[in-house]
Image: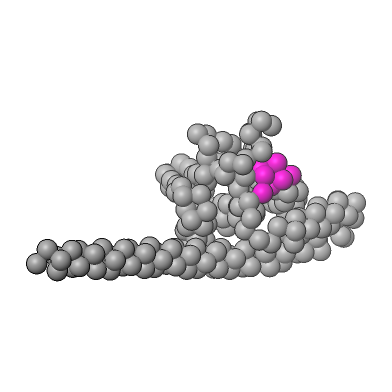
Amino acid sequence: IVYLLINIAANSGIMGHHFLLEWKKSLVKQSLLEKEKTQAHFENLKNQLNPHFLFNSLSSLNSLIFENPELASKFLKQLSKVYRYLLENNENDPVSLETEISFVQNYILLLQTRFDGGLIVNIDIDDHQRHKKIIPVTLQILIENAIKHNSTFEDNPLIIDIYIHHNYLIVKNNQQPKTRVEGSNKQGLNNLASLYQYTTGKTANIHNTQEHFIVEVPLIDE
C-alpha cells in the first residue's frame, strides 16, 4: 500500500508539474498573441494617420505656394523632416523624449501654419527628464487626436499642454468639441493605451472632463 501510495504521489507530482509547465506556456503564448494584436492595431492607427496628415499638409502647402512662397519653402522643409522621422522610426522600439520632442516641434510648426493662430502647444519638460523613452509618434497621435475632435479658431485657440507628472507624460487640451468628427471609431487611444500596457506593464490613463481632455502615458526608463 505504501509503495502504491508513493507511486501515485510521484505520478501526480510529475503530471502536476507537466500541467503547470503547459499552463505557463499557454499564458506566455496568449500574452504574445495579445501584444502582437495590439501592435497591429497601433500600426493600423499610424497608417491611417499618416496619409490623413499628408493630405492636409499638401493642401496647406498648395495654398501657401501662391500666397507666400517663402513660407511655403519653410513649410516644405519642415514636412520633409517630419517624414524622415516617421520613416526612421517605423517600428515600436522606444525612442527618447528628446528625439520625439525634436520631431514633434517640426510637426507643430506645420500645424500652426495650417491653423493660422488657432493652435497653441506648450511643451514644459526639463532637460534632465528627456532621456526617458516613449513609443515613437505617440505625441503626434495625441496631438492629432486633440485637433481631430476640437475646433481651432484664432480668437478661441485649441491649447495643448505637454508635461511630466509622476513619471507619466501628460498631454492635456481644453475642450471645444466639434459638432461632427469624421472617421472616428474611438479605438485609436484604446489601442495606444493597450500597447503601453503590454510594453511597460503600466496603464495609460484617459480623463475626459467638461473643461479638459487629458491622456497620461507611462514613461519608459532606460
The front one of 33 and 184 is 33
Q: Residue at x 28, y 68 (%)?
A: 15
Q: Where does the N terminus fall, quadrant-wise?
A: bottom left
Q: Is residue 97 magenta?
A: yes
Q: Residue at x 66, y 61 (%)?
A: 91
The front one of 13 and 5 is 5
Q: Residue at x 53, y 37 (%)?
A: 167
Magenta segment, principal secondary structure?
helix
Residue 8 at least partly seen: yes
Q: Against 161, is 193 above or below?
A: below
Residue 154 screen position, x and y as percent: 66, 45
Q: Residue at x 70, y 57 (%)?
A: 89
In the current view of this chain or complex, which residue is farthest to the right? 70
Q: Against 27, is 153 above or below?
A: above
In the current view of this chain or complex, which residue is farthest to the left? 1
Q: How many marks?
A: 0
Q: Identify the coloring.
A: one colour
- Residue range highlighted in magenta: 95-102
In terms of image quadrants, where is residue 133? top right
Specify whether 3 is left or right of 15. Answer: left
